[in-house]
Amino acid sequence: MAKNWTAIVLAGGRGPDDPMAKAYGVSHKCVLPVNGVPMLRRVVDALQKSQSIASIAISIESPAIVREALAEKVSGIAVISSETSAPLSAIVAIRKNSAFPVLITTADHALLTPEMVDYFCEHAGRNGADFSAGLARAEVILKTYPQSIRTFFKFKQDRVSGCNIFDVHTGKGLRILEQWQYLEAVRKNPWRLVAAFGPLALMRFLLGTMSLDDVFALVSKRLGLIARPILMPFAEAAIDVDKPADLDLAETILRSRTPL
């Protein structure tokens, strides 16, 4: 497997006013310990141990937060100032580190593993897409973690949840990030996401006739690129640490794994 990917970790937050930071008394959400290890450090560790990632950049408000989270692991990692939104932060980070392909993930992906990273990169590297998004089917998640509360997007034959892992493989892939700036505000509302691509798409979605592949084909046609889903076989890939129940579940899962 070629170790030629650039990884960008979106770590921008609301500082001490973030609900999770406030609830657990930390300066920033990404330094919140998950089973004793800051969540940003867990993400960086998974990226560094993968067989795909050649370089890592973190998009965040301050390099001091990265130093707090990573300690000795901070060496060799680029830090880029975050912007007013996740998609804009990703666009700016990619333009400053323009070596494609680019894997984008988030600092709260505390359950990320090298195996997940390599699985995603391998499939993104051979699917011919300009942009790929990692997704997990509901049955994969709920079979292992029936107590997990996820936002599922329901299509013709699939219910899927996002995995906070994306591939921008070419410059064309940036078009999706540009569209994402609008979609970010409605990302938890599947019908509004689909409506952004026209009334016919919305009608098909509401009638249950649109498949997952239909949606990606529609996005591809609308934006003049090739976008594809990558269905992840890892239930944990869809579990980020966004609320206290997520933290409890993540720590339970991590206690069952081999320590870092």
Image (cartoon, grey):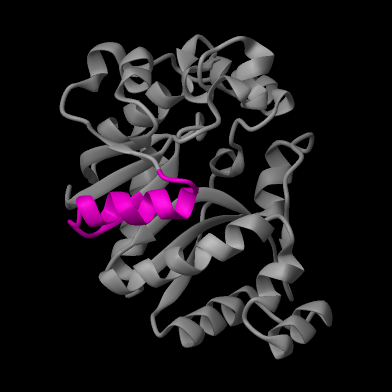
Q: Residue furthest bottom?
A: 200
Q: Does the magenta run of residues contain 97?
A: yes
Q: Quadrant of the C terminus?
A: top left
In this picture, which residue range is highlighted in magenta?
A: 83-103
Asked if residue 40 lies in the magenta stretch, the reply is: no
Q: Is residue 28 visible?
A: yes
* 197 left or right of 195 in image: left
Query: Image height check: is 215 above or below 22?
Result: below
User: Horizontal placement of 199 versus 238: left or right?
Assistant: right
Percent across and percent down for residue 110 are: 50, 29
- Where 106 falls versus 248 (above or below)? below
Q: Residue at x 43, y 14 (%)?
A: 259
Q: Is residue 54 left or right of residue 253?
A: left
Residue 184 pos. (x, y %): 59, 57
User: Could you tell me how many numbered marks the image carries?
Assistant: 0
- Image position, residue 111 (x, y; %): 51, 31
Between 28 and 154, the one lying in front of the other is 28
Rendered residue at 71%/62% (across/down):
153
Snapshot quadrant of residue 16: top right
Q: Quadrant of residue 166?
A: bottom left
Does residue 117 lie above or below 69 as drawn?
below
Residue occupying the point 43% across, 44% down: 105
Say which of 16 and 256 sits in front: 16
Q: Residue at x 60, y 19 (%)?
A: 21
Q: Residue furthest right?
A: 207
* Residue 130 appears anywhere in the view: no
36 above or below 235? above
Q: Quadrant of residue 256?
A: top right
Residue 15 or 71: which is nearer the viewer? 15
Q: Report x, y in % for residue 89.
A: 40, 48
